[in-house]
Image (cartoon, helix red, strand yellow):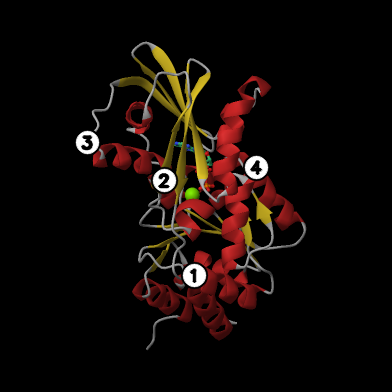
């Protein structure tokens, strides 16, 4: 073939299910020596399910009422956790309350007004910081110790319940981490907005030891910049709105196409269209081979 090696590498990548946006990107992918992986929707399938419903005593809410309230607020959100909550409510045939003035805070959760009350749904560590909420923190901590993602539900600033949510590991996650370690000479890092306990559970399953949990979108950027200042060329792999700033700040960014939010897909340099993590080490290898042919 007379096609230049980098272009044919792009074509090959496309055939394997990775869309790269330019020849420069293709080249950069071959240069990375550290990979930062997001958790939810990246190492996991991104289709989490509600496993626990814990209305707090004295709130007057039962399991169904708690779930319906949370789902009403989560309804407009594109976050995988939001979809889990809405799906669980649908499966139980619950009628969702009408929520207005929806707003979402990446890395934290969502908020809306329901029946004149402010309802927040999101990260216990962000929303339950007040020591006055300690008993509710315990419910969340127990769920997190069991490897779940706990989601707190607050009404007018008071916790009314906690939901437990769990996601399945992608079948090729462990092999991909091993392949990336081999290729880059460094074990990938887990960079997640989720809680420390859920993050560590998952990291142990895939063979990751360096876990950076509870990171807001901007914290993910800070981590990437620190590694790059130390001489690393970082590949960020993510799927969410919360990953977009880090995808933009890194040497190269890859978004997971199927679970991926529009913002992540736009910001990333490349997109995994076929939903397989294992294509990432394959593409790095492809880029290196092509580049060796060019120089
Ligand atoms: P990750 O980095 O693992 O993809 P995110 O940064 O998207 O996680 O989210 C971090 C945490 O913020 C979640 O674990 C959850 O506690 C909370 N969160 C964010 N968005 C939502 C939402 N729509 N509903 C409930 N919780 C949310
Ligand atoms: Mg994610």
Earlier-in-chain disc, 3 versus 2: 2
- From where the camera sits, is residue 191 visible? no
Mark 3 vs mark 2, CA separation in Å: 17 Å
Identified at 59% across, 74% down, the residue is: 178
Tell whether label 3 touches label 1 (CB within 8 Å): no
Q: Which residue is mark 4?
A: 219
Q: Earlier in the sequence, mark 1 or mark 4?
A: 4
Cβ atoms under marks 3 and 2 closer than 8 Å: no
Q: How much space separates mark 1 and mark 4, taking CA atoms?
A: 24 Å
Element assignment for label 4:
helix
Q: Which residue is mark 1?
A: 280
Which residue is nearer to you in this view: 20 or 295?
20
Q: Examine the image and state in which quarter residue 136 appears.
A: top right
Residue 45 in sight: yes
Q: Position of residue 91 (x, y in %)?
A: 25, 42
Badge 4 density bin: few <14, some 14–19, many ≥20, Cα 10 Å: some
Camera-side residue of 10 and 99: 99
């Amino acid at each position: 073939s007379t096609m230049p090696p980098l272009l044919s590498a792009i074509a090959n990548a496309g055939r394997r299910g990775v869309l790269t946006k330019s020849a420069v990107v293709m080249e950069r992918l071959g240069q990375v020596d550290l990979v930062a992986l997001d958790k939810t929707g990246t190492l996991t399938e991104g289709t989490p399910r509600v496993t626990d419903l814990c209305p707090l005593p004295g709130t007057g809410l039962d399991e169904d009422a708690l779930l319906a309230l949370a789902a009403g607020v989560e309804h407009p959100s594109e976050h995988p956790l939001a979809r889990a909550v809405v799906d669980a409510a649908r499966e139980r045939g619950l009628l969702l309350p009408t929520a207005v003035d929806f707003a979402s805070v990446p890395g934290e959760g969502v908020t809306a007004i329901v029946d004149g009350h402010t309802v927040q749904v999101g990260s216990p560590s962000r929303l339950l910081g007040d020591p006055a909420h300690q008993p509710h923190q315990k419910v969340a901590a127990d769920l997190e110790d069991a490897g779940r993602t706990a989601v707190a539900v607050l009404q007018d600033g008071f916790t009314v319940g906690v939901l437990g949510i769990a996601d399945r590991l992608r079948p090729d996650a462990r092999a991909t981490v091993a392949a990336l370690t081999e290729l880059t000479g460094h074990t990938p890092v887990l960079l997640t907005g989720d809680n420390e306990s859920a993050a560590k559970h998952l990291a142990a399953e895939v063979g990751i030891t360096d876990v950076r949990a509870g990171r807001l979108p901007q914290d993910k950027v800070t981590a990437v910049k620190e590694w790059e200042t130390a001489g690393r060329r970082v590949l960020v792999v993510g799927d969410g709105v919360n990953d977009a700033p880090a995808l933009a700040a890194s040497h190269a960014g890859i978004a997971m196409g199927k679970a991926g939010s529009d913002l992540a897909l736009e910001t990333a340099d490349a997109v995994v269209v076929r939903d397989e993590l294992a294509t990432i080490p394959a593409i790095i290898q492809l880029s290196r081979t092509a580049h060796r042919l060019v120089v």
